Image (spheres, rainbow, N blue to C red):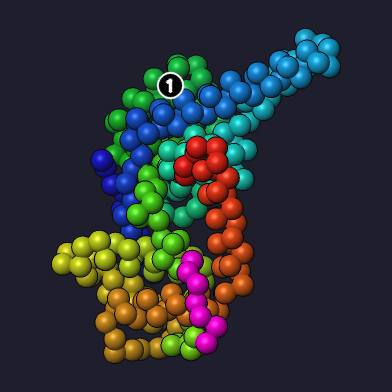
Amino acid sequence: MENIHIQTTHNVTLHYAIASVGDRILATLIDWLFFVAYFIFVFVLIDILNLESDVTVYFMLLPIAIYHLLLEIINNGQSFGKKIMQIKVMRADGAEASLSNYLIRWIFRLVDITLFSGMVAIVSILMSNKGQRLGDMAAGTTVVKLNKQDNPYPQFLKKIPDNYQLAYPQSSKISEKDIKIIANVLQQFRSNRSSPKNNELIGKAKLAAEKLMDIQVQLHPELFLQKVINDYNFLHKSELQEVTDLLRKTSTELDENNLHI
């Protein structure tokens, strides 16, 4: 599987696996299953309410037309199919996609997918070194694979004891975006501690965190960054607990419906 290397604003390079053509096709097929379920619902509703045919077309086509645009905007780059397949749209420079990015790639769906049954999209994805269809190229986006083991959230969404003592009060300067990068770097380092690239990566992350916090510490990068994550957890305890509860609730609901993110 191809990889995309993303340089963050702190000069730390993160690595993401580009979603394969198969992943994206399966995500699209899953989205179509949701379309079928929606069609059935609308047909039943129209039959019950005895609505006119013009109203039927409106109910059927408009939500389907804006489905991908709407879902990707409100669901952080993921339609239902992408969420189930653990892939998402993001900018090729590593930033979260914006409204204009989503809008541009949605407009190009007409050429990429609708008019030519997806053949243009498949060919352009295979030919692109960043897995981009024409809409991605125009919008400056790509689609990446989010494996559970590479997800940084579990590393800093953890319970901290009430009697925890801050290691570094300066951790309050660390933002959520920064802590995600730190957690991602730690995950990558722990996957292969002997890798020279991973050691260089975690060293850069330590320097970036020290610069943000305006401190210098004589501590192994792994231990230092883990302390920063623990401090962040403690400082944002109430916020993180709400997120954790929401993730747990969502996971339970998905398990009950035999769906797994």
Q: Which residues are magenta?
A: 157-163
* Residue 100 point in image, percent of width and height: 58, 44
Is 244 in the magenta? no
* Residue 113 point in image, percent of width and height: 47, 23
Residue displayed at 43% across by 43% down: 86
Q: Quadrant of residue 21?
A: top left
Amino acid identity at mark 1: Gly
Residue displayed at 59% across by 53% down: 249
Instruction: Judge the density around disc 1: few (<14), some (14-19), many (≥20) Cα neighbours within 10 Å.
Output: some
Toward the viewer: 259 or 181?
A: 259
Image-based side of 69 in relation to 225, left or right:
right
Q: Is residue 170 above or below residue 82?
A: below
Is residue 138 among the parts visible in the rendering?
no
* Residue 59 point in image, percent of width and height: 73, 21
Furthest residue toward top: 53
Helix, strand or loop at mark 1 = loop
Q: Is residue 209 above or below residue 1?
A: below
Q: Main secondary structure of the magenta part?
A: loop
Image-based side of 63 in relation to 142, left or right:
right
Residue displayed at 53% across by 49% down: 251
Toward the viewer: 101 or 153?
A: 153
Furthest residue toward front: 256
Q: Which residue is mark 1?
A: 118
Toward the viewer: 184 or 177?
A: 184
Is 158 in the magenta? yes
